[in-house]
Amino acid sequence: FFCLPPKSTMGRRPSRCYRYQKNKPYIKSRYCRGVPDSKIRIYDVGAKKAAVDLFPFVAHMVCDEKQQISSEALEAARVAINKHLTKTIGKDGYHIRMRAHPFHILRANKMLSCAGADRLSSGMRHSYGKPIGVAARVSIGQVLISVRAKDANGEHVIEALRRGKFKFAGRQKILKSTKWGFTKFNREDYVMKRKNGELSADGNIVKVNNYHGPLEQSPLF
């Protein structure tokens, strides 16, 4: 009497297997179905509706390598940064924005790893893998995470980003920006243009007044 051993597949591969960009981008489509959901579902955390004037300080975590970052790592970094900032400056004192989005699908050719698997498995026949997760493809100089806060809390923001770095492979740099919050204007220009009426606050960003339309509605009238 002979019975086959129970089927058992190998566990999830470590992310070092998928760290480098080797192949073309491979995204979810009608041809590639059954893709597991990304682990990161929230990309804006904290006081995301805080007015643009409230948080002038902004720091970025910038990638220093061309690589892939798994959605699990992005979520782990988000949780670590959020936890540190909630403890130090309170949940209404910052706004975290995740800037890398995981669209690239990771595949694995699932192998049997039980006793007697060599007789059951097909080796490298039909070895095109099944989707097992998703990752973000990032390049050198790409911003991974941005955090805005008040100037007084700048040191806490930098420390939180430093803790988030430990969740990623490779090398990242933390940069203090010269811009005002998440806008594209330098601080001096921002203050001057806000006083002149060239910019108007629009939620957590800023709107440029282009002076189109009736004259009586213009701030210069």
Image (cartoon, grey):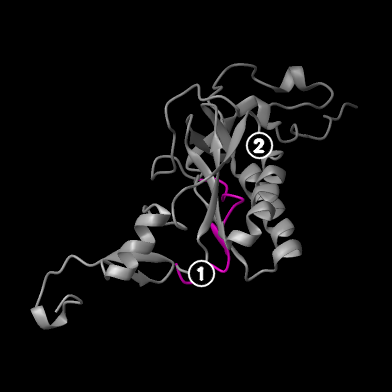
Residue at 53% x, 53% y is 58
Taking the image as shown, residue 89 lies to the left or right of residue 28, namely right
Looking at the image, which is closer to me, 7 or 195?
A: 195
Location of residue 212 in the rendering, given as x and y in whole percent from the top left corner: 12, 69
Residue under pointer 2: 168
Bin the neighbour count of mark 2 within 10 Å (Cα to Cα): few under 14, some 14-19, many 20 and up: some
Which type of secondary structure does the marked residue at label 2 adopt?
loop
Location of residue 76 in the rendering, given as x and y in whole percent from the top left corner: 69, 48
Residue under pointer 1: 54
Location of residue 70 in the rendering, given as x and y in whole percent from the top left corner: 60, 39
Q: Quadrant of the N terminus?
A: top right
Magenta region: which residues? 34-52
- Residue 206 visible, this angle: yes
Bin the neighbour count of mark 1 within 10 Å (Cα to Cα): few under 14, some 14-19, many 20 and up: some
Residue at 58% x, 59% y is 151
- Residue 109 visible, this angle: no
Taking the image as shown, residue 202 lies to the left or right of residue 62, namely left
> In which quarter of the view is residue 57 placed?
bottom right
Location of residue 121 in the rendering, given as x and y in whole percent from the top left corner: 69, 22
Q: Quadrant of the C terminus?
A: bottom left
In magenta segment, residue 71: no
Q: Are marks 1 and 2 in contact (CB under 8 Å)?
A: no
Which of label 1 and label 2 is nearer to you? 1
